[in-house]
Image (spheres, grey):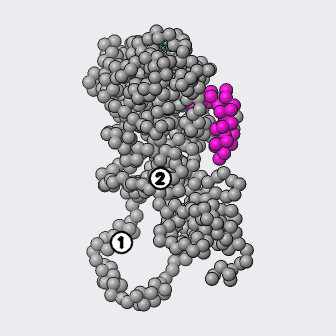
């Protein structure tokens, strides 16, 4: 087993109330697997981008309820944890083409925003360290651009939404806000328009057809030998 | 000091419901009275009599917290505050008179309407 | 310091624009808090209410932080409902240290509030002789409004409850004084201190429609051409029936801006209201 070859030091954690001894220094996600659970939901990218692995925990002798992404957070001794793979919510249906980029639009679709009591629980819960409360406040005062900017890095983990006393579903709200921003406020990206036109004109059809025809091994080879942009760009 | 509803209302409002002398000034001043099922002075009377059914009346939701009654009440009973307390008592049982998602015409409303309504009507 | 509030930033932008322009004329600058949140609009009375006080208290803490930067502890609002909420909560936490302790413990993400902020409604600034005052306002008037008959609508939160309201709740006069100083004819009408129905517009719109019908109709009977108000919610509600009686409701700062010739800060709509009421101008 992998755990034996790693560091000898271990920590005690409690997954849904059951005690497990796991190697120190690994992530919550790895610890959960180490303890014998298999992920069917609640894990995705394993890189802190998809928001699937939302987790809440408490520490011994501490009343606070902490929030984290399981794939990004190391286990600590005395962690009581459970994963919340999904914050239940219904997305309101709308046609973005018919909407105006105003605060009233968002409030009319998600009127519970008006119930925000500025408790800041959402901001404290956000593993992305976003100013979630401020983003909601910007919607209330009709500043969609600022709201979109503040929630740009939201990964829809839903941790804020399970903490919110006003029962706001932030991640759906934020998606709407960013859509409104992208469609009506942000300057149009020229290169995107050109590319969309190219796609529509069928410029890439042949390339795609080739890809479809390839065998899995060929595909893998192609993927492994692809150009990777350096982050400095 | 008191028992039942009068005590609860006294604790939460800081005002003594038994001071009310049923003069009716509050109801006579109330701009919303036409839409209420029980006039404000009767609401206070029902509190005095520990009548729990006062919590089911429409009045507590129609009251606009305009405070007209409270500035005029000769006994400083502060009916606006008491009605507000009744409203909170109901909300704490997770009962709300409106479902915001079902209200029509939200798009035109100014923020101030929606925010105040959600505070007063949805807890 | 200036606390705008949500509605003033969006629905009631014309209120903000005109207020800032008028004050600037008297060298009064409203410096907007660098960070603020919605105050919640209404005040919750229950003695054990905590959650409802968090938002206004957070704003007071923001003001406290901002205060030292600009060296002035006055927090000015335009919206009368924001004024009332902030003022009331300021009063509570100042007089009830237990409540403040509770709230501070809950809001462990913020510094403690030291109760040093002074909440003011902009009308208090405008009427303060050491800052602006009616005399100086009179001198700044550029237009002849003597044919304009204007009723004032105070809004509940400017008059009530006692101790928060800034005028006599039974016989208010500050808006009438202001109208006279601007050279227009003040119309005193019995509904001036009435409630417009407030948030009932969400609960049951017909209640508000009936209420404002009575109010605006009465203003017409007493001969008013238009109504001025201090509250964005009164503004919205009263204007539901503006066309029925041809009596529009505008913000009092818009009237001031018009009287002082600050047309560039007024919306086309407001200007056309004045044009239709006094012809040309
Ligand atoms: S804003 Fe909410 S949903 Fe988005 S990342 Fe933060 S906590 Fe998760
Ligand atoms: S958790 Fe909800 S109520 Fe609290 S500040 Fe965030 S959005 Fe507002
Ligand atoms: S005005 Fe005061 S004393 Fe008179 S009936 Fe109303 S609550 Fe009672
Ligand atoms: S506060 Fe309520 S009960 Fe009192 S006068 Fe106003 S609407 Fe009527
Ligand atoms: S698995 Fe995607 S963020 Fe953790």
Lower sequence index among marks 1 and 2: 2
Pick the quarter of the image with the N terminus of chain A: bottom right
Say which residue label 1 marks: A195
Q: Residue at x 38, y 66 (%)?
A: A190
Q: Is residue C35 visible?
A: yes
x then y, percent, for residue A61:
71, 54
Q: Residue at horizontal 71%, vertical 72%?
A: A10
Viewer-closest of A135 and C270: A135
Q: Residue at x 34, y 12 (%)?
A: C222
Q: CA distance from mark 1 to mark 2?
A: 32 Å
Single out the residue that lies furthest toward the front.
B3
Query: Which quadrant is home to the C terminus of chain A?
Result: bottom right
Query: Which percent across, then down, holds residue C204?
Result: 34, 31
Chain letter of disc 2 in the image: A
Instruction: Identify the residue position indicated by label 2 in the image.
Output: A170
Disc 2 residue: CB within 8 Å of ligand 1:
yes
Q: Foreground residue, A30 or A143?
A: A30
Q: Residue at x 38, y 49 (%)?
A: A101
Q: Secondary structure at mark 2?
A: helix
Magenta span contains residue A56: no
Task: For the residues labelled 1 and 2, say whether their Cβ atoms are less than 8 Å apart.
Answer: no
| Quarter location, residue B46 | top left
Respond whether the residues carrying marks 1 and 2 are from the same subunit: yes
Q: Nearer the viewer, mark 1 or mark 2?
A: 2
Q: Which residues are magenta?
A: C83-112
């Amino acid at each position: 087993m992998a755990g034996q070859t790693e560091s000898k030091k271990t920590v005690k954690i409690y997954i849904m109330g059951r005690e497990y001894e796991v190697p120190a220094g690994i992530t919550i996600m790895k610890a959960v697997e180490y303890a014998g659970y298999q992920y069917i939901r609640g894990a995705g990218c394993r890189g802190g981008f998809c928001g699937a692995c939302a987790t809440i925990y408490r520490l011994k002798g501490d009343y606070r309820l902490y929030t984290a992404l399981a794939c990004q957070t190391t286990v600590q001794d005395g962690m009581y944890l459970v994963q919340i793979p999904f914050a239940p919510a219904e997305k309101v249906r709308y046609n973005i083409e018919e909407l105006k980029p105003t605060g009233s639009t968002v409030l009319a679709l998600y009127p519970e925003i008006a119930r925000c009591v500025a408790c800041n629980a959402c901001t404290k819960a956000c593993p992305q360290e976003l100013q979630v409360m401020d983003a909601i406040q910007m919607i209330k005062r009709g500043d969609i651009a600022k709201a979109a900017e503040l929630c740009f890095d939201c990964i829809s983990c839903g941790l804020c939404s399970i903490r919110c006393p006003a029962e706001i579903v932030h991640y759906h709200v934020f998606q709407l806000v960013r859509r409104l921003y992208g469609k009506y406020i942000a300057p149009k990206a020229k290169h995107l328009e050109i590319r969309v036109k190219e796609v529509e004109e069928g410029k890439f059809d042949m390339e795609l057809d080739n890809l479809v025809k390839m065998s899995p091994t060929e595909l893998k080879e192609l993927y492994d030998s692809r150009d990777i942009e350096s982050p400095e760009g | 000091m008191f028992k039942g509803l009068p005590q609860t209302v006294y604790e939460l409002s800081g005002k003594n419901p038994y001071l009310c002398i049923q003069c009716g000034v509050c109801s006579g001043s109330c701009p919303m009275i036409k839409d209420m099922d029980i006039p404000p002075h009767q609401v206070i009377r029902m509190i005095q009599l520990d009548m729990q059914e006062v919590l089911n009346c429409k009045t507590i939701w129609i009251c606009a917290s305009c405070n007209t009654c409270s500035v005029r009440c000769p006994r400083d009973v502060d009916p606006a505050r008491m009605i507000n307390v009744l409203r909170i008592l109901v909300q704490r049982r997770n009962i709300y008179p409106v479902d915001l998602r079902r209200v029509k015409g939200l798009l035109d409303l100014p923020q101030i309407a929606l925010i105040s309504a959600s505070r007063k009507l949805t807890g | 310091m200036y606390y705008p509030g949500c509605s003033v930033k969006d629905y009631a932008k014309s209120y903000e624009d005109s207020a800032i322009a008028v004050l600037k004329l008297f060298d009064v600058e409203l410096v907007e808090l660098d960070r603020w949140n919605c105050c919640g609009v209404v005040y919750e009375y229950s003695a054990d209410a905590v959650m409802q006080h968090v938002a206004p208290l957070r704003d007071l803490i923001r003001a406290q932080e901002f205060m030292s930067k600009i060296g002035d502890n006055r927090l000015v609002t335009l919206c009368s409902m924001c004024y009332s909420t902030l003022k009331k909560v300021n009063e509570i936490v100042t007089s009830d240290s237990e409540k403040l302790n509770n709230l501070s413990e809950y809001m462990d993400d913020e510094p403690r509030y030291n109760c040093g902020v002074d909440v003011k409604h902009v009308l208090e600034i405008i009427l303060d002789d050491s800052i602006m005052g009616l005399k100086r306002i009179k001198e700044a008037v550029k237009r002849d409004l003597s044919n304009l008959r204007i009723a004032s609508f105070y809004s509940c939160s400017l008059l009530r409850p006692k101790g928060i309201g800034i005028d006599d709740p039974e016989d208010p006069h500050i808006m009438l004084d202001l109208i006279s100083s601007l050279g227009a004819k003040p119309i005193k009408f019995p509904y001036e201190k009435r409630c417009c129905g407030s948030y009932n517009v969400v609960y049951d719109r017909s209640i508000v429609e009936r209420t404002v019908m009575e109010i605006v109709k009465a203003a017409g009977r007493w001969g008013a051409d238009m109504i001025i108000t201090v509250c964005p919610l009164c503004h919205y509600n009263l204007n539901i029936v503006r066309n029925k009686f041809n009596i529009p409701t505008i913000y009092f700062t818009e009237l001031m801006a018009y009287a002082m010739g600050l047309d560039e800060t007024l919306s086309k709509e407001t200007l056309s209201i004045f044009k239709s009421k006094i012809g040309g101008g």
